[in-house]
Image (cartoon, rainbow, N blue to C red):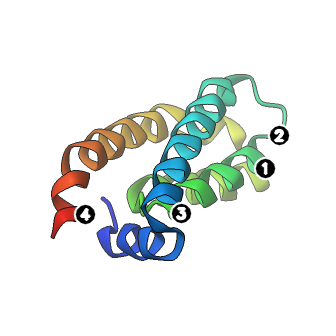
Amino acid sequence: MISWGQILELRNDVGQDGFDEVISIFLEEVETTLNHLPQSSQLEEDLHALRGSAMTLGFRACAALCAQGEKLAGEGCADRVDLNAIQTTYLESKALFLAELPARLAA
């Protein structure tokens, strides 16, 4: 569900202070985007951005669902995008991320 190697690499690249800021910005932007997806007039673009954000912090499962949705939206099948699955997977990934992050960073 989460690529911890990606997260550790990001933390090493930006430093701990930068990492904390990236996490804060990521969570805020993702949740804003998720909240407006059902009304989005540019679903393909929004899912593309969401996929990129998810990949930044190693939320692999969420990124994969966004990629599938992005493809469907690009093919004119936006009504087949499972927004509930994307939301649920994001929330599960976020909970796991926040619960395990301190121990993973301490290792």
Few, some or many residues within 10 Å of mark 3 (<14, 14–19, 20+): some
Q: Is residue 101 found left or right of 6 in the rendered image?
A: left
For the residue labelled by badge 4, is the local secondary structure a helix, a strand or a loop? Answer: helix
* In the foreground, 63 or 11: 11
Question: Which circle, 4 or 1, is nearer the viewer?
Answer: 4
Q: Which residue is mark 2?
A: 42
What amino acid is at disc 2?
Gln
Q: Which residue is mark 1?
A: 45
Question: Which circle, 3 or 2, is nearer the viewer?
Answer: 3
The answer to whether mark 3 and mark 4 are in CB contact below 8 A is no
Q: Which residue is mark 3?
A: 56
The answer to whether mark 2 and mark 1 are in CB contact below 8 A is yes
* In the foreground, 25 or 86: 25
What amino acid is at disc 4?
Leu
Image quarter where the C terminus lies is bottom left
Query: Can you give x and y, in whole percent of width and height, for residue 62 in the image?
Result: 45, 52
Q: What distance separates the C-alpha of mark 2 from that of mark 4?
A: 37 Å
Q: Which mark is residue 28?
A: none
Few, some or many residues within 10 Å of mark 2 (<14, 14–19, 20+): few
Q: Quadrant of residue 104?
A: bottom left
For the residue labelled by badge 1, is the local secondary structure a helix, a strand or a loop? Answer: helix
Q: What distance separates the C-alpha of mark 3 from that of mark 1?
A: 17 Å
Q: Which residue is mark 4?
A: 105
Marks 4 and 1, the one that precedes in the sequence: 1
Q: What distance separates the C-alpha of mark 2 from that of mark 1?
A: 6 Å
Q: Quadrant of residue 12?
A: bottom left
What amino acid is at disc 3?
Thr
At horizontal 32% and vertical 61% (from top left) the residue drawn is 2
Marks 3 and 4, the one that precedes in the sequence: 3
Query: Can you give x and y, in whole percent of width and height, for residue 91 in the image?
Result: 37, 35
